Amino acid sequence: MKRSFSHQVSLKFAPEFQEHRQDASAILLTPDKHLWLASDETTTIECFSWNGNQSFDNQRSFKVSNFIDLPEPDDQEIDIEGFDYDNSYLWLVGSHSWKRKKPKPDKSDLKNIQRLATIATEKNRYILARIPLVKGELYKSCQHPDNPNQQLNAGRLQLTKTGNLLTKVLKTDAHLGMFVSSTVPSKDNGFDIEGIAVSKNKVLLGLRGPVLRGWAMILELEVAESSPGILTLNSIGENRQQYRKHFVDLKGLGVRDLCFDGEDLLILAGPTMDLDGPVKVFRLTNARNLPNNTLFKPDLVMNLPYGDGEDHAEGMTLFDAIAKQHSLLVVYDSPAQTRLKGESEVLADVFKLQC
């Protein structure tokens, strides 16, 4: 299937953030033409403004800890892997994953073998949160712009000693329990959240891993505020479970990002393991009300480019508000040198979507 490539746009990073222009992990374009971006190496949220000249600039940085309580200091990454915007809230999700150290060229074979045996996680990775977003500004608490009687409050899913309420309830799940209870790293087909799509209080979370016999998974949650700053999970599944599982055939790939397109769900799919490709975009129709106990086979929308150790598509967002046509903006982790402009810019791709 051919890619419907349209054009490229530039992201111009502020000097203090230039070192992270090559590790974008999540993006979101809001209706007011602000582009929200995260690096998987920080605990901040970046906001860019569209300047009308095929580029985003005027970067502003927001510390997540200014809006919600983090379990660890700001120097411990959240590993943000997804954004969405719904009902004046910016939603974000961390990877909820473990990681394995990788070999380095300046280390001896013995040292690198020892590194491969070292796995770890950070408590900040277990964040599922929402922050009030009104007119391009984030708030800890504010009035709803369309309903002065409604107060919007920043909050995160309740944490536990080893994760949060989600990982707690998944530990006994027939498909995911062994992965959540163990310490299998994300790039070893371990548990790894990448992508979030929100419709009111319904939250869909994409799983990069595990992929089970070629089937990827999307988790469905219903989130509610239990107390100021704290979110909980409502019972929505069979036997009063606090989650539902949806199995999707992505041709052996895992979920790398999610994005609602009307009633449908766009799924960015890529390898679960440490591979370059393939990378594809799928469409799951009528995804705002998915039935239980179903194996889904989404339609292939397009194949995306990838390189040899570079150009890993990591985030996508609808670009209609700027492109004036139905389109998708895609950013890349480890971008190719041809995408890097000067010391501060990186190029992202825009692809046409069929209506």
Image (cartoon, helix red, strand yellow):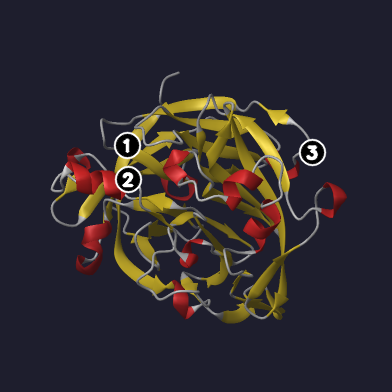
Q: Earlier in the sequence, mark 3 or mark 1?
A: 1
Could you tell me which secondary element the residue under label 1 belongs to? strand
Disc nearer the start of the sequence (3/2): 2
Q: Report the mark closest to the observer, 3 or 2.
A: 2
Name the residue beneath numbered marker 2: 116
In the rendered structure, which amino acid carries the disc numbered 3? Asn
Counting labels gives 3
Question: Around disc 1, counting alpha carbons within 10 Å, would you say few (fewer than 14), some (14 to 19), or many (20 or more)?
Answer: some
Judge whether residue 103 can be spotted in this image.
Answer: no
> Which residue is the site of mark 3?
292
Q: Amino acid at mark 2?
A: Leu
**41 or 14: which is nearer to us?**
41
The label nearer to you, 3 versus 1, is: 3
Q: Which one is in front, 117 or 68?
A: 117
Q: Position of residue 234 (x, y in %)?
A: 77, 61
Q: Secondary structure at mark 2?
A: helix
Q: Quadrant of the C terminus?
A: top right
Whether residue 53 appears in this view of the structure is yes
The quarter of the picture where residue 131 lies is bottom right
| Residue at horizontal 19 percent and vertical 66 percent from the top | 15
Residue at x 62%, y 74% (from the top left corner): 145
Q: Nearer the viewer, residue 23 or 91?
A: 23
From the top left corner, tell me how far across and down residue 77 is, in percent. 39, 64
Looking at the image, is mark 1 or mark 2 nearer the viewer?
2
Q: Earlier in the sequence, mark 1 or mark 2?
A: 1
Q: Is residue 142 left or right of residue 21?
A: right
Q: Amino acid at mark 1?
A: His
- Tell me the quarter of the picture where residue 153 sits: bottom right
Residue that mark 1 sits on: 7
